[in-house]
Amino acid sequence: MQRIALFPGTFDPITLGHTDIINRALPLFDKLYIGIGRNTSKQPMFNELQRLAWIHEIYKNEPKIEAIVYEGLTVDCCKKIGAQFILRGIRYVNDFEYEKAIADMNRSIADHIETVFLTCLPQYTSVASTLVRDVLKYGGDVSKFLPDVVMTSISSNK
C-alpha cells in the first residue's frame, strides 16, 4: 500500500518554510498532495490559480507531488485522495499545542488518518505567510523568505 500524505494550508504565499517541510517529507511518503484549503474566514492576498501555479512550478520535476485545492474538512479531502497521513509543520511550542488539538479532532473523526509533525529548520521559525504578507503589503523585502519563482512572480506584478 502506498503511503499518501496531504500537506494542507493556505500557502498564501508558499514560503521557504513550507518548502523546507515539503522537501524533508518527500522521503517519508510515496505521494504528497499539497492541499490549498479554502478558508471562508480568510481573505487571501493571492488567488488559488496563482498559488497552484507557484507550487506546480517549484515542484515541476517532482513526480511524487501533486497540488490540489479543496474545501471542507481536511479529513474528507484525505478520504477523497486516499491519504492516510496529514503532514503539518511545527515552528514553536504554541504551534504544537494548536496542531495537536486539530490532530486529535481529526483522529476522532477519522481514526485511520494519522497526523505527522515535522519541525522546521531554525532559520525558518520566523517565516509565516501572515508575516510575509504584512511585509509585502508595506513594500518590504521578502526575498529571503520566498522561493525564487514566487519572488520573481511578485516582483513582475508590481
Image (spheres, grey):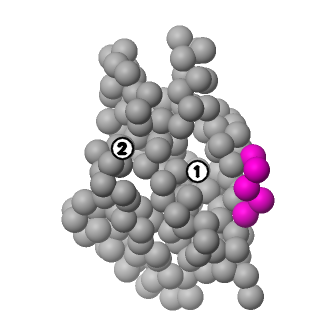
Label disc, if present, on residue 21 of the rendered structure: none
Q: Residues within 10 Å of mark 2 (few under 14, many from 20)?
A: some
Which residue does the image show at 77% across and 59% down from the upper left? 63
Quadrant (top left, top right, bottom left, bottom right) of the N terminus? bottom right
Please state which of residues 17 and 13 is positioned toward the viewer in this rendering.
17
Judge by depth and name the residue closer to the eye, 34 or 108: 34
Disc 1 marks which residue? 36
Please provide percent x and percent y for residue 64.
73, 63
Report the residue at 55% width, 22% height from top: 154
The secondary structure making up most of the magenta span is loop
Q: Give how far across and how far down residue 26 sits, in percent.
A: 61, 66
Please provide the residue range marked out in magenta: 60-64
- Between the C-alphas of marks 2 and 1, the distance is 16 Å
- Circle 2 is placed at which residue position? 128
Q: Is residue 39 visible?
A: no
Q: Determine if residue 149 is in view.
A: yes
Q: Is residue 4 left or right of residue 137?
A: right
Dot 2 amino acid type: Ala
Q: Quadrant of residue 43?
A: top left
Which quadrant holds residue 71? bottom right
* Magenta-colored stretch includes residue 56: no
Seen at 55% across and 67% down, the residue is: 25
The vertical placement of 45 against 28, above or below, is: above
Kind of residue at badge 1? Ile
Residue 88: percent from left, percent from top: 45, 65
Q: Residues within 10 Å of mark 1 (few under 14, many from 20)?
A: many
Q: Is residue 35 above or below residue 82?
A: above
